[in-house]
Amino acid sequence: MKIELYIAQLLYRYQCVTVPGLGAFLTEIQSAQVNESSNSFSPPKKRIAFNANLKNNDGLLANHIALAEKTSYEYAVSAIQYEVFNWKKALEENEVLPLKNIGDLRLNADKNIVFTPYDQTNYLVSSFGLAPFLSPLVKREIFEKEIEAIEEKATITMVPEESRTANPYLKYAAIFILGLGMAGTVGYTMYENQIATQTILVETAVQKQVQNKIQEATFFIESPVPAVTLSVKSDKEIKMPYHIMAGVYSKEKNADKTLRILKRLGYDAKRIAPNRKGYFPVIYGSYSTFAEAEKAKKEINKKHNPEAWILIQTL
């Protein structure tokens, strides 16, 4: 039975696979590597090591073999023991014991097992399909020199031959034209600044004149407007539409009698024009607001006439 096949299968899934009576194969994850000397790149992988001190049976390898071979656990343990016996015998005969896709086992001078792993197989599942590769060295200096040489050649070919023998006075003419342009620009800028300064001075003078005119109009009025005399209306002209009624009489003599009595009592009583039925009304007084009339009515109701009421009418 080739138990190294089952050991390799377990190395993908576990960090430690123990071979009872021989030792344990251990895995450790190594990050990606870059070798600058050889320009090689290696993906992350599991490094395999061997520890001869871990010899106890943990049941992992035997259970895996029993499931794969569809046999009993006891038979798998016996098969492992038989294979380990043959491996130790081969090592004692100073032979190198190769384990496929895992590595080589051999004994050193002290009769200790030395393990040399194979690098061809990567047991890290996350790096499946990734293989080491070499990258050619990029010589940047050579490329930069070649680009500079190409640029120099392109520059030389673009310059016409006639430009070397052209009239040298053209150069001075160009300088002269450039100078005129700069002088024009400077002159135009100075002209704009001068115009702006003059505009500010004119605006200042105009504002000063306006202020003087305002002060003269305010404090030195040559022909003052004549005073306006307002006439205030007398009390008789003020509308007083609220009246407190003392009574309405069918006979004028009774109305006159009531008027005299109210005047003796101190009321500003008076008669108003007869109504549509020919009766003669007598009032205690007239008021401009309803509030004033209501206040007076309450006092009259309390002291003199409980039947007094308010008539709203413009006389």
Image: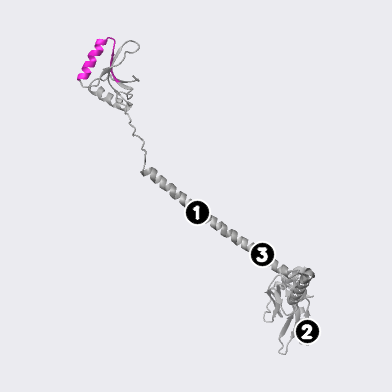
In the image shown, does 200 or 121 lie closer to the viewer? 200
Q: Which residue is drawn at the image coordinates 72% and 84% (left, top)?
A: 113
Disc 3 crowd, CA 10 A, few/some/many (<14, 14-19, 20+)? few
Q: Nearer the viewer, residue 133 or 150?
A: 150
x, y percent for residue 148: 75, 73
- Crowd around label 1: few <14 · some 14–19 · many ≥20 (10 Å): few
- At 75% from the left edge and 84% from the top edge, which residue is drawn? 106
Would you say 309 lies left or right of 60 here? left
- Left or right: 178, with 226 as reference point: right
Label disc, if present, on residue 142 of the rendered structure: none
* Res. 178 mark: 3
Q: What residue lies at 22% left-to-right and 13% top-to-bottom? A: 257
Residue 72 visible at all: no
Location of residue 80 by image quarter: bottom right
**Vertically, is 279 above or below 123?**
above
How are the residues colored?
one colour
Specify the amino acid type for callout 2. Answer: Val
Residue 282 coordinates in the image, percent (x, y): 27, 16
Position of the N terminus, as image quadrant, is bottom right
Tell me the quarter of the picture where residue 15 sits.
bottom right
Which residue is the extreme one toward the left? 264
